[in-house]
Amino acid sequence: MADYMKKFRIEKYAVVCGGLGLIGKEISIALAQAGAKVLVLDIDSAKGADFEKECEGKNLDVKFIEFDATDIKSYGKKIKDLFSRFKINAWVNASYPRTKDWGNKLEDVKLESWQKNVDMHMNSYCLLTKNAAEMMKKHGIRGSIINLGSIYGVVAPDFEVYAGTGMTSAPAYAAIKGGIINFSRYAASYYGPSGIRVNCICPGGIFDAQNKKFVSNYNKRTPLKRMGKPEEIASVVLFLAANAASYITGATIMVDGGWTCI
């Protein structure tokens, strides 16, 4: 008889790149609660130290490592070094880098801004996936790589939810998340023979004290009539990182309250 609860235990090393963000912190906590030794990669060393201390107080094995996900040229050396020190079985890309003019309307987006956002966000996810998978392959690790996509990488925005808010959906976001989703499929096919799984999670809107009009508009548009919570994304990451999902690769999993079903 299978021990199903054991399938959800992750008593190995797991990386959360962007592990200090709104969703990234919850992912780090979820993995640590499941028994993982979590390596949180992010850029804010002060916040990283605070988070590490907070987790230590809850008997969670979390270690902060300063890492700039936008420094693409450094990946080869840094990721090689990480795998030489730790046997990493799960790698989660959850960072959300963006320029200061993020959120401009399409007609106002400058070429330099578009290129920089694509480089920092889409290209970083794709190249981190490639580098992590190559190290897993080299070390004989049948690991799991999980990328965060978005509903807006699958469907177009419903611009009515932004009515009366002064907000909009960043145009580059659609291109970036669409690219991440399909590259995750590509990587799943490419690294499957090595036993390396690559999947993508597509969150819907996550509540973060946004404009009240936006939240109201969003809630009306979604079948579950509410925005998501960070822990609802973390739970799915936990599933995909664990042996419970051992026969799932190349999947795009919507965690969106039903947004994309209508």
Image (cartoon, grey):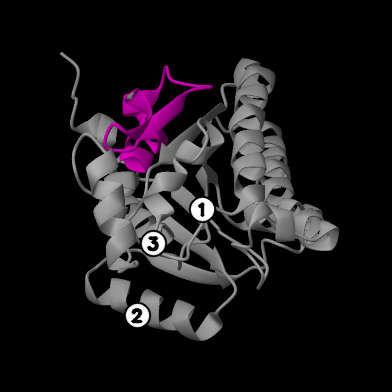
Vertical arrangement, residue 56 with respect to residue 13, above or below: below
Q: In which quarter of the image is residue 141?
A: top right
The one of 219 and 6 positioned closer to us in this rendering: 219
Quadrant of the rendering where the N terminus is positioned = top left
Mark 3 vs 2: CB contact within 8 A: no
At 24% from the left and 55% from the top, the residue drawn is 216
At numbered mark 3, what does the secondary structure look like: helix, strand or loop?
loop
Mark 1 vs 3: CB contact within 8 A: no
Sequence-first tag of 1 and 3:
1
At 63% from the left and 62% from the top, the residue drawn is 104
Q: Where is residue 20 in the image (x, y as percent from the top left)?
A: 45, 68
Which is in the foreground here, disc 1 or disc 2?
1
Q: Can residue 46 be seen in this view?
A: yes
- Neighbor class of circle 3 (other Cα within 10 Å; few <14, some 14-19, many 20+) is few
Calculate the distance from the C-alpha at mark 3 to the C-alpha at mark 2: 42 Å
* Residue that lies at the very extreme toward the front in this rendered image: 164
- Residue highlighted by disc 3: 164
Sequence-first tag of 3 and 2:
2
The one of 172 and 125 positioned closer to us in this rendering: 172
At 26% from the left and 38% from the top, the residue drawn is 222
Q: Position of residue 219 (x, y in %)?
A: 24, 48
User: At label 3, which amino acid type do we have?
Assistant: Gly
Kindly identify which numbered label has been placed on residue 53. 2
Q: Quadrant of residue 51?
A: bottom left
At numbered mark 2, what does the secondary structure look like: helix, strand or loop?
helix
- Residue highlighted by disc 1: 94
Sequence-first tag of 1 and 2:
2
Kindly identify which numbered label has been placed on residue 108. none
Q: Quadrant of residue 189?
A: top right
Q: Please report the bounds of the magenta region as a residue range.
A: 236-261
